[in-house]
Image (cartoon, rainbow, N blue to C red):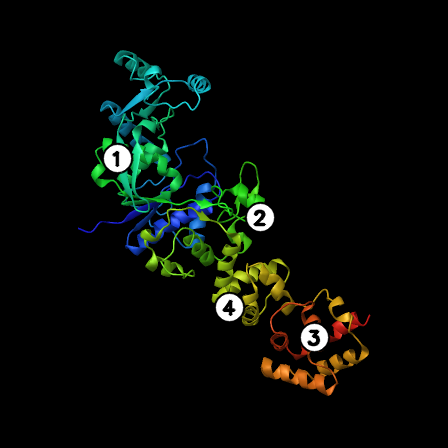
Amino acid sequence: MEQKIRVRFAPSPTGGLHLGGVRTALFNYLFARKHNGTFILRVEDTDQTRFVEGAEAYINACLRWCGIEPDESPLKGGPHAPYRQSERKPNYRAFAEQLVDEGYAYYAFDTPEELDARRKETANFQYGQATRLSLRNSLVLTPHEVSQLLQDGVPHVVRIKVPEGENVYFNDMIRGDVNFDTSIVDDKVLLKADGMPTYHLAVVVDDKAMEISHVFRGEEWLPSAPVHILLWKYLGWEASMPQWAHLPLILKPDGNGKLSKRDGDRLGFPVYAMNWTDPKAGTLTEGFRERGFLPEAFVNMLAMLGWNDGTDRELFSLTELIEAFDPDRISKAGAKFDFEKAKWFNHEWIKSLDAKALAPLVKPALEAEGIMVNYETYLEQVLTLIKERCTLLPDFVAQAAYFFRQPQEYDVAAVKGKWNTDKSVFFKNYADNFTGEGDAAAAEGAFKSLAETSGFKPGELMLPLRVMLVGGKFGPGVFDIALLLGADEVKNRITTALEVINA
């Protein structure tokens, strides 16, 4: 029988969603869709000290913006609800107790103060094989003492008892065979004093309960893999253990270490998918969406950080990514983040979208600047003209504003040096004779003909015309602009600009 593909994205609701987290979600989503599988969102909120109000809703909003919404989640529900770990709390203690009963885990009654003292005494202190018998736990206490401590409600944790001198290995879909010597693995806490599981226990119990078939997660979880594999084995679930794929890190632009929010702040680019406001500090961290990225471009860019289809192709829609996605093509090496390259993806996607699709994205930005758009068809004509000049959505404001209102300033210095009365006469004449009919080539031909008849080289009049219509040395073809503005508006603008230039 063919394996049922079920994958999960399991973030903690602790703040903004880093682009590395979105890429993890994306790769899970692509794999699920490629194999007609199920993509699950599971919120791992067992660490209540780090829980941030609003973070879960923000995660949902980010996935929705990216177009990679889950099939099962706290919002949507599903056959394996609940999908918040905090709501599954009763499930975990039973498995922790089972591990203790079978000798694979133990109770540890050490206080935080006692452990702090040991850390001060011993450099790089680890609670594990070398130290466990000198600490306060059920491995050294008598059964009666343990029973009494439990009965008295003395705070305690449950730790896995990592075996000595064993080799834990597994086959990673990206890295091939991976081996760990258990002598360097410490006895991780599985159940905390508040009864909540740690990630290590919860992730195994929930992956089993939710029938997860494949786990795509960040490379930073690789050192935890031996503990998780031991738990799958100790709980008797080894046969149904998922296949693992540890994704490469997204690195700083210089390649020196993992990309962080601090790097974005320092270098002036976003690292979160969308704006995130810290509810405690009130600080706002800008996201890719608000910087002006299209979701299609953001997703495309993320997919290419550590993956390719084996060719030089770089531009993919989400549907095309699903079709092309193959975990064998994920790199083992970290991927450097390049913001200029990210902007290139956005520029390419802006160019590829038709004006009708761009209009609802651009219109709010224009209206926020007081530029009211009354005719959708006119806006679409403007966008068709200028989209190749825009890299981020806010660029449309500067590039489009002059189509909706007269220039508020003129780059007089660009034309004043070679200006004379004869040119003023020429432009008055041109304004009176411009009909606004035909195409750009015909309009350019008429302009050049009039220039030559008036004794001018057409080239020396093109820049002044542009400045009169748009205010500066920018924009698409000047005759495309003129035709879109229309005869009355062109005459009005030339008349106004001549007053400024001749003042």
Secondary structure beneath dot 4 equals helix
Mark toward the viewer: 4 or 2: 2
Task: Return the x and y of residue 11 as percentages of the image width and height.
Answer: 40, 41
How far is the residue under mark 4 from the one under mark 2? 30 Å
User: Circle 4: is it few (<14), some (14-19), or many (20+) Cα within 10 Å?
Assistant: many
| Residue sitting at x 50%, y 66% | 351
The residue at which mark 3 appears reads as 465
Q: Residues within 10 Å of mark 2 (few under 14, many from 20)?
A: few
Q: Do the numbered discs 3 and 4 sit on residues whose CB atoms are within 8 Å?
A: no
Which badge, 1 or 2, comes first in the chain's sequence?
1
Q: Earlier in the sequence, mark 4 or mark 2?
A: 2
Residue at (30, 50) in percent of width and height: 38
Inter-mark Cα distance, 3 to 1? 74 Å
Name the spot of residue 231 as percent of width and height, x first.
27, 32
Q: Label for residue 355? A: 4
- Left or right: where 324 falls relative to 395: left
